Amino acid sequence: MKTLQELRDAIDALDTQILSLLNARAQCANEVGELKKREGSAVFRPDREAQVINKLQTLNDTTAGLLKPHSIGNIWREVMSACRALEAPQRIAYLGPAGTFSQQAALSYFGTSITEIACPSIDEVFRSTASGTADFGVIPIENSTEGVIARSLDLLLQSPVHIIGELSLLVRHHLLRQVNSRDDIKVVLAHPQALAQCQEWLTKHLPHAERRAVSSNAEGARLAAENPEWAAIASERAGSTYGLHNVAQAIQDDAHNRTRFAVICLPTTLDAPTATGRDCTSLAVSVTNRPGALHDLLVPLKQHGVSMTRFESRPARQGQWEYIFFIDLVGHPSESNMHAALEDLKKLCAFYKVLGTYPQSEA
């Protein structure tokens, strides 16, 4: 058996090799960047990055590697993020301030070698992305406990941006406070979604505390850092950012609480990603109010063998239609069955918009 020092020496030697290989990869990435500049191609290609990670995860499985698939994804996203930053750091807008789950989603998707643009509202994320202030935006779309984020869906209808990626994030809410105790908490601050996701815990443990909605969980943490009688529901990152004690961990009512985020940009920044074999297409459609209209809307999907993973309705706020339906389909428009289904579906709709086509999230 090797000694501890021998093992440390072996690790040091491997680290040296890894560093050399990473720099060699960065050099190749630089050359790719130069070619892209001459061709006018996009720096960031989510389809290509998804294919790289999927290929490495499959290779790791077939060779009985020790690393877990999500670890490989995290490692290579950081490697690719660092290489992209050599060309130009991507400007990413998200719902701020620092410490939100939206920031965590942005860093998880793009890696940490980015220029962060923390926005005070979801509306501002859309404005920053649509105006070109940000290259990409990250927005919450739906939560496994509380359902869709209505404002995000409404803005997707109005904005010229489209979805080019998605991320599913396990959300753990913690009770954060300036004082390391749960006693004498007068106010609990959080985003309305977080308050709803923790309502059972709050009713049981803090029944007399006022529940106060704020623009984001991280904003609640910032405010709680200023008042010892206030507490916030937020992430560990927010607690670290604002120097708060974690006085109750994982207080969400659903232990498997997840939030799905969408990555948005202008089509001129990045066109729809090419097919990866694991894709999603999101639509917003409406039909005239007549008997059987909704049934007819689903017929082309069945006829062409296209699976539907989400169907949501939102009241239409303008025009002659009563509801807008948001639909997620499995597949890419370049695939023959999906193309045929979309063409038939379009003929049935009074309103039809493709919100985006993108690689499916790993989780």
Image (tube, rainbow, N blue to C red):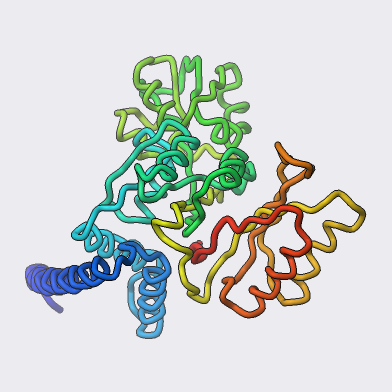
Residue 320 spot, x, y in % from top left: 78, 42
- Along the line of sight, which residue is nearer the eye, 34 or 309? 34
> Residue at image x 38%, y 49%?
106
Residue 10 spot, x, y in % from top left: 11, 74
Q: Looking at the image, how many numbered discs can be counted on the residues? A: 0
Is residue 197 at least partly visible in the picture?
A: yes
Residue 192 spot, x, y in % from top left: 57, 30
> Residue at image x 47%, y 59%?
165
- The answer to whether residue 228 is above or below residue 90 is above
- The answer to whether residue 31 is above or below residue 350 is below
- Along the line of sight, which residue is nearer the eye, 312 or 170? 312
Is residue 14 at least partly visible in the picture?
A: no
Quarter in which the N terminus is drawn: bottom left
Which quadrant would residue 150 be assigned to in this image? top right
- The answer to whether residue 81 is above or below residue 208 is below
- Along the line of sight, which residue is nearer the eye, 305 or 184? 305
> Residue at image x 72%, y 51%?
325
Name, please, the residue furthest toward the right. 291
Residue 19 spot, x, y in % from top left: 13, 68
- The answer to whether residue 239 is above or below residue 278 is above
> Residue at image x 71%, y 38%?
318
Which quadrant would residue 314 be assigned to in this image? top right
- Along the line of sight, which residue is nearer the eye, 250 or 313? 313
